[in-house]
Image (spheres, helix red, strand yellow):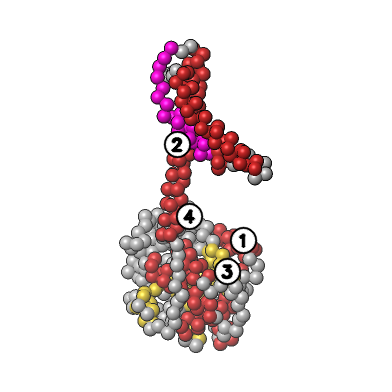
Amino acid sequence: MIKVFRIKDLIKYFLRVLIPIVVLLIILQTFSKQKNNSQSISLKTQKPLIGCISDTIAQINIVNGNTTNEERKTRFIFLSELDIMENLKENLENNIEEENDVQNEIEEKSEENKITVEEAKTGLKTEVIDSGVATRSTNEYHGVQINNTSDKELNEDILTPNIDINKSNVIIYHTHTCESYTPTEQFNYEASGNYRSIDLNFSVARVGDELDAALGTYGINVIHDKTYHDYPAYNGSYSRSLITAQNALNNNQGTDIIIDLHRDAIADPNYAPKVKIGEEYASQLMFVIGVNHDNWNQNLKFAVKVMEKANELYPGLFKPLILRNAEYNQHLAKGGCIIEVGATGNTLEESMNSMKYLAKVISEI
């Protein structure tokens, strides 16, 4: 329905409002000229005046009267424009409110996922918790236990960690990105396989985030790649992760330490190798080194160097190192390695706890 109003009433209201405004504008203009200011009244001054007119018009009580079709058409257009302006104002306010809600939600989620790492303390009492599974070793070097399942013969010269490592950059990636742990109340996830999850917040990739943050506290630059290599297909994981590791190395030449972070593949919910450091429990770690490439001895020396320091700071943090007839993409760097963090029986919390101790050890070598 088209609303109309009498011209006389409109003129009366406009005169009542506009005359004081015109007088005010003349006074302001005169004052401005006296100050030799040739600029017009700023938008900040005009906006309240325009708002006053809009408020006054909005309060006019429109009544139906004897008007021509032309007058009705003109007034309908005038009122439609006012409605459009009012709608625009309302939509703008709604959009601003929605944007604020979205921003607040993003900030809340960011706060929830924020990683805060406390620097690992030293001099703490360390105790290995019996997992019920006996460890095996074939060789020992100054307290570093090694389980040699490869066809390589080890001697003092091969095991001596006389190697220089550039630790300014560290590359972390995951050949088996979806490996996950025993769910807990805090980290309860929907499994996409047997102790596997495609949600990076609950897999070994989340442990990698923790190591990334912990190394950063020591000024070490970290490149953490969380590309899926075992999903949707498991077979061919190492071929795919080789491309990821090679690309990361190409973009960060001179990097010595390339860590392929895993979880022990033993799918036994009762197997949870852990160590108690101070008052907290942490998953035990294990190096896996492949010997089917020319760089294997440097990889081994690097692992021994890390384990020596770990035995000094946190004895029991590492299980015996495993040497295997494999390559595991470790030919890329002299500090190339697999580090397995815990097993299926461990929790994500325990595995995340381990990372601050590993970072402390790496910073000390």
Predominant SS along the magenta part: helix
Vertical relation: 319 (above or below) 345 = below
Mark 4 vs mark 1: which is more N-terminal?
4
- Secondary structure type for disc 4: loop
Amino acid type assigned to the residue bearing label 1 in the image? Asn
* Of the two numbered discs 4 and 1 in the rendering, the one whose residue sits closer to the viewer: 1
Disc 2 versus disc 3: distance between alpha carbons?
Answer: 48 Å
Q: Which quadrant is home to the C terminus?
A: bottom right
Amino acid type assigned to the residue bearing label 4 in the image? Tyr
Residue at the disc numbered 3: 221
Amino acid type assigned to the residue bearing label 2 in the image? Glu
Magenta-colored span: 47-66
Disc 4 versus disc 1: distance between alpha carbons?
Answer: 19 Å
Instruction: Using a 10 Å C-alpha cutoff, classify the residue at mark 3 as few (fewer than 14 neighbours), some (14 to 19) or many (20 or more).
Output: some
Disc 3 versus disc 1: distance between alpha carbons?
Answer: 17 Å
Q: Are marks 3 and 1 in contact (CB under 8 Å)?
A: no
Q: Are marks 1 and 2 in contact (CB under 8 Å)?
A: no
Instruction: Using a 10 Å C-alpha cutoff, classify the residue at mark 4 as few (fewer than 14 neighbours), some (14 to 19) or many (20 or more).
Output: some
* Of the two numbered discs 3 and 4 in the rendering, the one whose residue sits closer to the viewer: 3
**In the rendering, which numbered label is found on residue 90?**
2
Mark 4 vs mark 2: which is more N-terminal?
2
**In the rendering, which numbered label is found on residue 247?**
1
Mark 1 vs mark 2: which is more N-terminal?
2
Q: Depth check: 35 or 132 in front?
A: 35
Q: Are marks 2 and 3 in contact (CB under 8 Å)?
A: no
Residue at the disc numbered 4: 231
At 57% from the left edge and 85% from the top edge, which residue is drawn? 160
Magenta-drawn stretch contains 99: no
Disc 1 versus disc 2: distance between alpha carbons?
Answer: 51 Å
* Of the two numbered discs 1 and 2 in the rendering, the one whose residue sits closer to the viewer: 2
Residue 2: x and y in percent read 43, 18
Q: Which quadrant is home to the N terminus?
A: top left
